[in-house]
Image: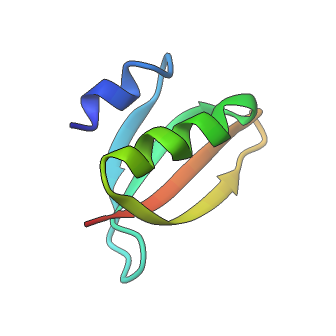
Amino acid sequence: MLRSITSQFEGSYVKTLHDPIQTHALYGVSNEDVYRAKLELSKVGAVRFRLVKTSYGLTIVCFKLK
C-alpha cells in the first residue's frame, strides 16, 4: 500500500515511528512535493499529519495510519 506512494517520490522511504500520535513517517519528500504526498497518503487512510523540515531541502511527513 505505501510502496505505491514511495515509488512516486524518488529516494523516499517509510519508517514506523514509536510515537503516540503519528505511527509512520515518509522520508525524502522534496518541499515542492509535500502537498501531493499528503494527498496521496490521505487516499490510503493517513491522518494527523506533521511536517518536519530538514536542512537538505527535504521534508519528513509524519502521519497516523488507521
Q: Position of residue 24 (x, y in %)?
A: 36, 57
Give residue 4's quadrant in the image. top left
State the residue in front, 41 or 14. 41
The quadrant of the picture occupied by the C terminus is: bottom left
Q: Position of residue 18 (x, y in %)?
A: 32, 72
User: What residue appears at the point 38 percent right and 76 percent down from the top-left corner?
Assistant: 19
- Looking at the image, residue 46 lies above or below residue 39: below
User: What residue appears at the point 59 percent right and 33 percent down from the top-left corner?
Assistant: 29
How many labels sit on residues? 0
33 lies left or right of 13: right
Outermost residue to the left: 1
The quadrant of the picture occupied by the N terminus is: top left
User: What residue appears at the point 28 percent right and 37 percent down from the top-left corner?
Assistant: 2
Q: Position of residue 53 (x, y in %)?
A: 72, 50
Q: Position of residue 47 (x, y in %)?
A: 43, 65
Outermost residue to the bottom: 20
31 lies left or right of 45: right
- Looking at the image, residue 28 lies above or below residue 15: above
Q: What's the colour scheme? A: rainbow
Give residue 33's quadrant in the image. top right
